[in-house]
Image: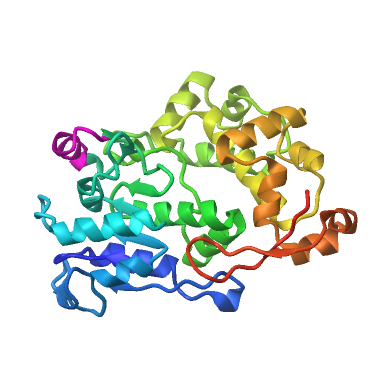
Amino acid sequence: MTFVTQGVSTFDLGGIGHVFADRTALGLPAFDFAVCAEEPGPMRTDLGLSLHVEFGLDHLAKADLIILMPYGEESPPPFSPAVVTALRSAHRHGAIIAGFCTGSFLLAATGLLDGRRATTHWCLAKDLAAAYPEVTVVADALYIDEGSVITGAGAASSVDMCLYLLRREYGASVANAVAREMVVAPHRDGGQAQYIARPVPADDDERFTSAIDWARSNLDEPMSVNDLATHALMSPRTFTRRFRDTMGTTPHSWLLSQRLNHAEELLETTGLQIEEIAHRVGYNSVAVFREQFVKRRGLSPRAYRQRFGHHDDMAARAPREQKSAGRVQEKPGRLHDRRGPVCRGG
C-alpha cells in the first residue's frame, strides 16, 4: 500500500509499483499493490499527470506494508490529524510503515520515529532534524531499518529500500530475482555520501572495476586490501581512498557484505552443510561465520535456512538433511497472504 498526497513523485510511484509488480509467473510471491490518499479521487503528480486514487484512509487498516510517498512541495505540508491517526492505528495493528525522501517527514509526524534513527534525502536532513528533534537523523544512509518503521533517502533509494524489505521478509533469492528482472543492483553498498558530487579520477576506472569483479568471483579465497590493490594496480592507500569515494564504505566492510550475501543465497537455494557454505564464502572458522551471520541477519544460518530455504531444491540436493528436518510447514510472509513452503532443515 502506498500513501500519496498532491504532487506525488511519478518516478518513485512507478519504481515502487515495479518492485511489487505481479511476478507469480516467475514463481515469486504475490503482492496486492494499491494506492490510497486522504480522500479518494483525482490527484496531480509532480509532472502534472492526473492520477485517480481509488482508496481512502480506511484502506490503511488492511495493509501489511504502508509506504509514504514523497510529495512535490519543497517544504512539508501540514499533516492532517486524520492521516496521523490512521497511520498510528495501522502501525499499532501490525503494519510496517516506510517513508523516504519527504515521506520521512510524515512518518516523523506520527511520533513513531521518536527515539529512533531515520534518514531522508541528504539535502533535507538538517530540516528533518530541526523539525523533529526527538529523531536521530542519519544523513548519509540509503535506508535505516528500525523494525516496524523504515526510512529511506531520495529518488532511486526507494528501490533500494523496497528490495531490502523483500530481502528481510522473504530472503535473498526473492529480492535478487526481483532486482534481476528490474535490471538493478540487488544491494548497493555504502550510503548517500557516494552520490554527493565530488571529484573522482576516471583514468583508473577499468582497473578498479576489474578488481571488484575479481573479488566477487573469488569469495571463497582469503583476500586483503593489498590483494585488491594489486589487482587494481594501485597502492593500498590509493585503493582504499578510491574505494571509499566510489563505494561509500571500506573494502573490509564491503567484502564482508559480499560474503554474507552469497551465504544467504546458498542457504536458501542449496542443501549444503553450514560448514561447507562457510568455506565457500571464505571463512576458515565456522564459529566466526555464524557470529558474523547473526550480527548481520539477527538469525543463525540454520534458523535463516528454516525461514527462507526453498524446500523443493533442498530436498533434491540434500536428502539426508530433508530426512532429519521433519515435516514442512506453510509459513505466511508479513507482506501478503501467500508464501511458499519453508524447509525446517539445517
Residue at 58%, 33% (x, y): give it. Answer: 295
Q: Report the magenta stretch's main SS.
A: helix
Residue 213 image point, x, y percent: 59, 43
Q: Is residue 125 above or below residue 312?
A: above
Task: Report the residue at 80% width, 54% height from top.
Answer: 271
Residue 234 in percent (x, y) is at: 52, 25
Q: Residue at x 42, y 63 (%)?
A: 64
- Identified at 35% across, 51% down, the residue is 157
Q: Which range is magenta?
A: 123-135
Q: Is residue 71 left or right of residue 141?
A: left
Counting from the top left corner in percent of width and height, residue 233 is at: 56, 28
Residue 36, visible in the rendered structure: no
Q: Is residue 134 visible?
A: yes
Q: Nearer the viewer, residue 290 or 56?
A: 56
| 7 over 242 or under it: above or below | below
Identify the image quadrant of the N terminus: bottom left
Does 128 lie within the magenta span?
yes
**Frontmost residue, 295 versus 281:** 295
Q: Is residue 162 left or right of residue 70?
A: right
